[in-house]
Image: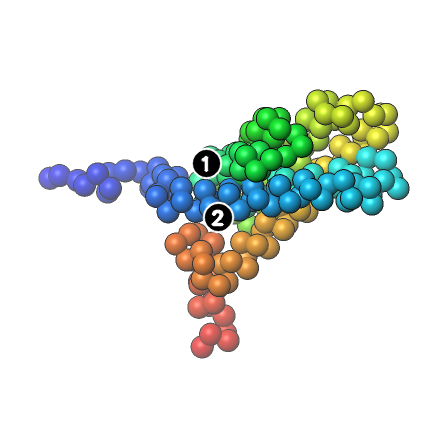
Amino acid sequence: MQVSAVASTPASVRRFRWRVVDIVTASVIGVAAGVIFWVWGQAWTPLSTALAFLPGLEGLLAGGWLFAGVLGGLVIRKPGAALYTEIVAGVVSMAVGTQWGPLTFLWAVIEGIGAEIGFAILFYANWKLLGALVSGAVAGLSTAVLDTNFSSVAAQSGVFRAVYFGAAIVSGILLAGLVSWLIVRALAATGALDRFGAGREARSREAESPDAA
């Protein structure tokens, strides 16, 4: 008796296999995020100036370049999604033109790996708020290490670097983690993510809601 290729494929493998819609959606997220990255870069100077009352507090802005990986991971829910979307976003912002030039790509790769590790720590099984916050935190840690060792921040005082380091992690948790989770919740509620796990979960919650009766 023959068994079809689909039926013989382990469920775990099918769950992590990328579909065409996954690739397209992750690419769209990456491109859109890349444009936002560029805008965020233009706002860096005035925003960092506003935070200059505490040296190093500008690290709170780091999350503005980290959300692509977390958002992509939460939507696609497959290994590699966080890294892919962060890299696409970095390439787009670099192509549009940033003051950091080619270094933008390197930072995007490392930050994408950080976001990816955050989901991997939870075995790619938690796509709720916890998963988003952990991914954002590790992405924030990755950029904190990069910035305090290989950017102009490295030339600052120890106190400045320490504040920046902590602020970058907090920014990763809030701007990349929490905000991405809220965005996914909002998109899922509109039906835009019905072909993904987040959308199906939203429909399931609506069906179980007493108000739905």
Q: CA distance from mark 2 to mark 1?
A: 12 Å
- CA neighbours of label 1 inside 10 A, class few (<14), some (14 to 19), many (20+): some
Q: Secondary structure at mark 1?
A: loop
Q: Which mark is residue 79?
A: 1
Counting the numbered discs, the total is: 2
Task: Name the spot of residue 95 as percent of width and height, x first.
Answer: 54, 34
Scheme of colours in the image: rainbow
Residue furthest right as drawn = 53
Question: In the image, residue 103 lies at what x, y percent?
Answer: 62, 26
- Quarter of the N terminus within the rendering: top left
Is residue 155 visible in this depiction of the protein? yes
Residue at (59%, 26%) from the top-left corner? Answer: 102
User: Residue 64 in the image: x percent, y percent?
Assistant: 66, 43
Q: Nearer the viewer, residue 179 or 198?
A: 179
Q: Is residue 61 above or below residue 103?
A: below
Which residue is at a point 37% across and 47% down the rendered structure image? 21
- Residue type at tag 2: Val
Q: Are marks 2 and 1 in contact (CB under 8 Å)?
A: no
Marking on residue 75: 2
Q: Position of residue 47 (x, y in %)?
A: 77, 44
